[in-house]
Amino acid sequence: MSPQARGHLAMLVFSALVAGSFSLGSMIANEIAPAALNAARFAIAGVVIGIAAMMTTGLPRSAARAPWRYLVLGGLFSAYFVLMFYGLKTAPPVSAAAVFTLTPILSAVAGWVLLRQITTSHMALALSVGAVGALWVVFRADWLAFRAFEIGQGEIIYFWGCVAHAIYTPMVRKLNRGEPPVVFTFGTLVAGCAVLTVFGWSDIRATDWANLPAIVWIGLFYVAICASAATFVLLQYATLLLPSAKVMAYTYLTPSWVIIWQIALGQPAPGLLVLVGIGLTILALLLLLKGDDLGMARQQTAPD
């Protein structure tokens, strides 16, 4: 399997795992303060990834060079997760997942600013199709709501979290100095936990940890292990193999995965008109993957 194919596979798994955090997150967002939840999440994920690093690559001293890099990355991802859970207090899971699909466009902009990565015309078309699909879902296929630009407060809050996520993606490649993904992830998680502990100390102290509902603990361990530890490694691994915009293109699958999660958790499926927007986001992903195949074919047929 080629490095590009491994990067695509990593992002496919990433999108499925991330989707679960929307469905479970909406169930626990009003049960615990977002800062307290995510501080615990980063701590648990940090332990898991730290053990994984020790059992595989180890933690070389060279990884501790320029620790400010981890503070930058940890701060960006901390902002994303905290704003996500604030948004999920009011935003429906499918709608929030649709907002998440706007990150490829944001990543393309951030990738150009930070890395001078060029977005081709084919990729721009795919991103545009995905954006239309995302807006279709966010406005719930209501043309009048779109004309009035009526966006829920939760969606607006979460959008700014997605901006932080989009900046994070190219920053991984810019700041990585050859550290293995699992080691780089561990440093990011430790730094993120420190940032959240300082930021949310009052919420952490005020939380009655012993009497939290069982669903909170289920959601906490899912987002810590599946939607944090695993996805951090998958995202950083794929980012080192694929362009930023193409990495984040897999977010277009998130609303579809969320619908599957919602149905599995006993929630009703969205209306048929909303599914049209979901279809457009899937089309955007297929366009991007087709463009990737065409690019690889040109490279293979190019003269030496």
Image (cartoon, rainbow, N blue to C red):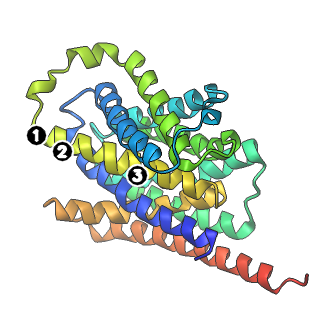
Q: Residues within 10 Å of mark 3 (few under 14, many from 20)?
A: many
Q: Could you say where residue 56 lies in the image, as x and y percent from the top left?
A: 48, 51
The disc, 3 or 1, on the residue closer to the chain's N-terminal end is 1
For disc 2, the marked residue is: 218
Mark 3 or mark 1, whichever is nearer to me: 3
Q: Amino acid at mark 2?
A: Ile
Residue nearest the viewer, comparing 134 with 237: 237
Q: Amino acid at mark 3?
A: Ala
CB contact under 8 Å: marks 2 and 1 = yes
Vertical comparison of 137 with 298: above or below = above
**Residue 188 visible within the image:** yes
Vertical comparison of 261 with 55: above or below = below
**Residue 140 visible within the image:** no
Task: Say whether residue 16 is left or right of residue 5.
Answer: left
CB contact under 8 Å: marks 2 and 3 = no
- Residue at 16% x, 59% y is 265
Q: Which mark is residue 214?
A: 1
Q: CA distance from mark 2 to mark 3?
A: 16 Å
For disc 3, the marked residue is: 230
Q: Residues within 10 Å of mark 2 (few under 14, many from 20)?
A: few
Q: Could you say where residue 153 lies in the image, as x and y percent from the top left?
A: 37, 36
Which picture quadrant has residue 163?
Answer: top right
Q: Amino acid at mark 1?
A: Ala
CB contact under 8 Å: marks 3 and 1 = no
Q: Secondary structure at mark 3?
A: helix
